[in-house]
Amino acid sequence: MSRTAQVSIALAVLLLVFAKLLYDLSAAAHSGLVPNLANDALNWAWPYYNYASASIRSGVFPLWNPYTAVGSPFVADLSVALFNPLNWIVLLADVPTGLVLLQLFTVFVGMTGMYCYTRYLQLPWPARLLSCTLFAYALFTEAFHPTPGGSLCWFPTLLWLTHRFLNAPGLSKAVGISVVLALCFLAGFPNFFLYTCMVLLVYGTVVLLGIWPQIGTAGVVSRAAILVPALLLVPGLAAVQLLPGYELTGFSVRAIELGSAFRDGSLFERFSLGLMFRNYLETDLAYVYALPDIRVPSGIYYLGGALLLLPFAFAARKHRLVSIALGSAFIFMSLFMLSTQVPALSFLQAIPLADSLRMHGRGVAYTQSLLIVLAGIGLAALYERAQSPAVVSRSRALLGALLFVAYAAVLLSFAFQILDNKYYVASLVICALLIVYVLLRSTGSSWAMRCCLVIALVIVVDASVHRSNRFLVPAFAQDDDAFITSNAARAKAAPGHYRVFFVPLREGAAYRLANLGPKYQVPNISAYTPMALARWGNFLRYLGGEQEYDHIMSSSLNQRFYGALTPPLQSLLAKEPMILDMASLRYWIAKSGNQESATALPRAYAVRHFIQTQDEAGSLAAIKANLPLMAGTVVLEGASPSFPSAAQPEPAQRGEVVITLHEAQQVDMDVDVAEPSIVVLTDAYYPGWEAYVDGKATTVFRANSVFRAVEVPAGEHRVSFRFRPRSFFWGMTISLVSMGLVIALVFLDRARRRHSQQIR
């Protein structure tokens, strides 16, 4: 077949793949699947990127998010990933359309990386076509959310760069690995970044051991001497996200040192690990999170007839080292995923940071990607056999065919156990017959070579039948109903900057309604983010009742507090209205009828009575002991005002503090008090907030365990808060210096190589 014909077929398949992906996106809107807690594209990505886009278009870079719970650092949240260049696509268009473009562009990046890797391995074009398109479908499944897709898409590129460096080391190549690893981290999914590092380590170690006899110990040392220092650039390049993110983990429910992996046979691990063993073969329906109204094809990680090609990958002499390296990485990842469930494998949890990750079953995406490359190598072995002029003995060919038939029969035995699986069975049978033909056909046959192309196309078509996006994406979802949009607009226009609460009727709806705050830029007391502030959770837990709170969390789907006020938690907090009144929650918005709290404290107010404590436990105890009086007093933690406290708590002087500006990272207010007072702002206390009274810097106090406050003297004053986190500015500085160092190293390396060539 001519080169032109090969390229034409490849481009046609590529266009068809993207057309199928677009069809799946639009078809999802008509599948009857309603937004649910598992649909992070709607519940998380859309609201947060809507806020980011609106903020940036207004000329403010959103370091802080004032519209979620009591406020939280925005870009410090790893999953926001605003420093990932791929995500900038979302900011260039309206957010729903931008998320679709991002999803497709993420797939394109992954396919490009897979093409470069398989081309470097010198796989024939049918094998490249198979690997690229299968990875496109696999990546498309993960790319419904920007963070996992944005991390996984760099995996084939890193395999290519790593293998290329080990074969022919160079400083520019080592720097390239560091840059792409930094992009993988900046994509915002720590699980996938750690999985990428672990797989690359196993893969690179096996390849290095394989080439050791040729390069010797000196070659190994020289490669390490180049690569290890270059890898130090990764934290430098990622510092703009790494430093604020690390700071946030110390103040959030996802504190690294505490660990957050699900264990003890939890629902998440049982579900994800069950899919690991089923999805290579099965295509029936699975119930997500054990909820009968959320059903998706369990072929999320479907490989279909590609499994038939795996034995040939290890039989191919040309790519045997690569196959062993990929197989070793596959075995390692499978054991690592099981390490949270199998006590004998628990030692793998000693891997740095492994204990801080959630749902190791997500590593299925990596085991699948490794098998996709192995399938491509297997097809390459068949193609090269058909192309080779060497003669294979009849008995040897027959023995190979019989062994393959036995293997195919095992796969078919699994397939026949699944109902409504005719396409998968048909693809297995067709591919098995074609492979037997190639094995028995005399070598050098053009028909056998064409059979390899047909095998690739059958597998790709079968995968496209079963693959689909798991959940709706914003561009194809229905807009929020008029009840939500009208009430959001009303809350946004209401005076006083009071907080609102969109009341959910069930737990799944709590996650769907939680992030309406950043979506519509209204201060919503509920939230849905894995990096929720721990102080806010502890505040609700202690004041609401620790035993009841812990029972609610243990029986919830997320098993921990992620900021969402679910119906059980809402009922618990309703027993003590002052708990949420202290957070300035005034408007309760529900279809059963809106309500307004007459006792909600203003967003900013002044008091003269204060209680001093030394730590969080003391603050919470003091609040609980004085809960009915909290409208006229404030608990200050580790603070020493310059004036004595008033003798008795007094009603909050609500008319004396007026907020004149409340933006993402700036709050201004006019204060008029007759005596020295404490001005309380019911927004979260967090490192980086600075305060000024009449333009002069002053100390920010931690108030009522969660909020912030300042001391003001008697009279009229202008009080200002500014968010200027040192972690962000230091991180930005380090990243810019690291980028400059990368450019300098690449130019120096190229200059050195040109000089060496001139000498020769």
Image: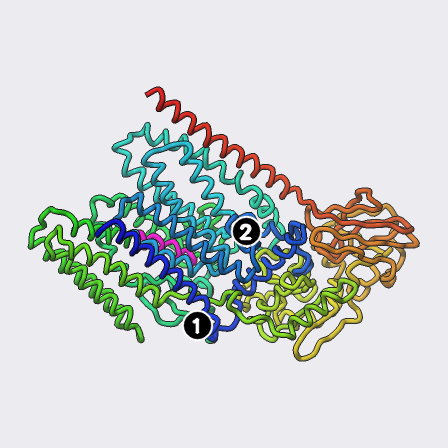
- Residue 370 among magenta residues: yes
Query: In the depicted view, which residue is nearer to us: 560 or 26?
Result: 26
Residue 753 shown left or right of residue 89 in the figure? left
Q: Quadrant of residue 539?
A: bottom right
| Disc on res. 295 | 1
Query: Answer yes or no: do the residues labelled 1 and 2 have beta carbons within 8 Å?
Result: no
Element under disc 1? strand
* Left or right of 558 on screen, residue 2: left
Say which element carries label 2.
helix
Q: What residue is drawn where x is 75% and y is 73%?
A: 596
Task: Determine which residue is flagged by label 2.
Answer: 88
Left or right side of 180 for 392: left
Residue 561 appears in the picture as rendered: no
Q: Residue at the location (32% across, 30% down)?
A: 219
Looking at the magenta stretch, what is its main secondary structure? Answer: helix
Q: Please identify the residue farthest to the top as the structure is shown.
A: 759
Name the amino acid, label 2. Answer: Trp
Give neighbour class at mark 1: few <14, some 14-19, many 20+ (Cα, 10 Å): some
Query: How far apart are the alpha carbons under marks 1 and 2?
Result: 32 Å
Residue 705 pos. (x, y %): 72, 55
Q: Total label count?
A: 2
Amino acid on which the number 1 mark rests in the picture: Arg
Image point (36%, 56%), residue name: 135
Residue 322: mark in rendering? none
Answer with the quarter of the image where residue 609 lies: bottom right
Nearest-to-viewer mark from 1 and 2: 2
Residue 17 in the image: x percent, y percent? 37, 60
Horizontally, residue 750 falls left or right of residue 389, namely right
Residue 108 versus residue 227 in the image, above or below: below
Instruction: Name which of mark 1 and mark 2 comes first in the sequence.
Output: 2
In this picture, which residue range is highlighted in magenta? Answer: 361-373
